[in-house]
Amino acid sequence: MPEGPSAPWAQGGLDRAALLGWLQEDAPGRLENLWGWADGVRQRHVGDAVWLRGLVEISNHCARSCTYCGISASSPPVGRYRMAPEEILEAAEKAATYGFGTVVLQAGEDPGLTGPFVAEVVSSIKAKTGLAVTLSLGERPDEDLAAWRMAGADRYLLRFETSDLGLYGRIHPDMGGASDRLAQLCRMRGMGFEIGTGVMVGIPGQTWASLAEDLEIFRSLDVDMIGVGPYLESDGSPLAGGLGEALKKSAGAEQVPADETTTLKVLALARLVRPDANIPATTALATLDPAGGRPDALRRGANVVMPNLTPPRYRRLYRIYPGKADVHETADVSWASIEGQLETLGRTVGRGPGGRGAVDVGYGDRNWFKPQL
Ligand code: SAH
């Protein structure tokens, strides 16, 4: 019974207290209800199509010192790379060949990815492939963002990571000016981007109350895309050491665990508060549970998967956390089985760009074709 009088929002909606209650729920029968509601709302609002977005990690240079991240400026030495425009274009062309409707360009906050460089890459991808282009390049000045939008970029992903500003300050040190990711998201929406955000679940120091507030923000910002994954310790990072210990101690019994069930609860609740959002089954979840992470997420509200198209020689260097599930998965290999896997879940591969509220345009649309592999 996905909706109806017993649905969690039927009487008075999913208010703060209800969100808090569901986040801390561990009765198996009640959780089954939550999964069923989220799956039903997903089915009703965005259908059975699963959208595939080809992920290209275009640079692991980073000027920031985020205390959770394995490629931050202060992380233990890691071989740095920045893909050449031709390499990025080649990866985007792969996405088109595989029939994916979107390519996602992600990187550290890399000043070497200048405004004009990215604008040029975006316009050549648009000209050569017609794919939807999503950018995830961190905090950037409006001037760059506007130029990228003008060049044809469709969407931008920028997680606010946690709504607890005190905690945010500990995990994401400022570089001069204050970091205000929510403000950047609002400005990007004004520029015409579809906006995506999200959080990590189980950050040391993260409390249940702040996680409920994160969900309220998804709802009130009316975001188009929501990514949630478990926090994973990156060895050698401050958050995996003394800083993390101290933050956990300060949260005490209110500390949110960085586990699969809690992540799935956040994902399911995200679907309930934002019924037509695009929600990925994240790589971080698949890292925690290689066999079950993605299918479980797809059964509890998710409708997007992001196969990694970064050339393998770079992929192993984009080590934001260890053991990243997609380091050994290549889209070429996974593709053959993904359609079958989705079928077993009663789902289909979405064709077309798959923007907010998209319906599957089907194989008949002249711009989209069934991949020949
Ligand atoms: N530089 C870009 C992209 C960062 S990587 C930006 O800052 O937006 C994309 C996401 O990976 C981050 O937003 C963060 O939520 C997640 N991530 C980074 N390190 C992680 C870790 N150790 N565990 C889990 N998720 C992590």
Image (cartoon, rainbow, N blue to C red):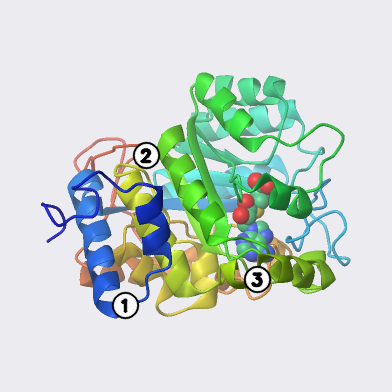
The kind of residue on which mark 3 rests is Gly
Q: Nearer the viewer, residue 252 or 338?
A: 252
> On the image, numbered disc 1 is attached to which residue?
27
Name the quarter where the C terminus is drawn: bottom left
Answer left or right for 63 relative to 91: right
Which numbered dot is residue 353? 2
> On the image, numbered disc 3 is attached to which residue?
252
Choose mark 2 or mark 3, whichever is in front: 3
Question: Eyeballing the image, is 64 above or below 203?
Answer: above
x, y percent for residue 301: 32, 58
Q: Earlier in the sequence, mark 2 or mark 3?
A: 3
Query: Could you tell me how far apart the alpha carbons at marks 3 and 1 are, in whole angstroms?
Result: 22 Å
Q: Earlier in the sequence, mark 1 or mark 2?
A: 1
x, y percent for residue 330: 52, 68
Tell me which residue sits at (72%, 48%) in the image.
166
The kind of residue on which mark 2 rests is Pro
Answer left or right for 167 relative to 298: right
Q: Is residue 219 visible?
A: yes
Some atom of ligand 1 lies within 8 Å of the CB belonging to the residue at label 2 = no
Answer left or right for 181 relative to 276: right
Local crowd size for mark 2, using a 10 Å CA cut-off: few (<14), some (14–19), many (≥20): many
Local crowd size for mark 1, using a 10 Å CA cut-off: few (<14), some (14–19), many (≥20): few
The kind of residue on which mark 1 rests is Ala
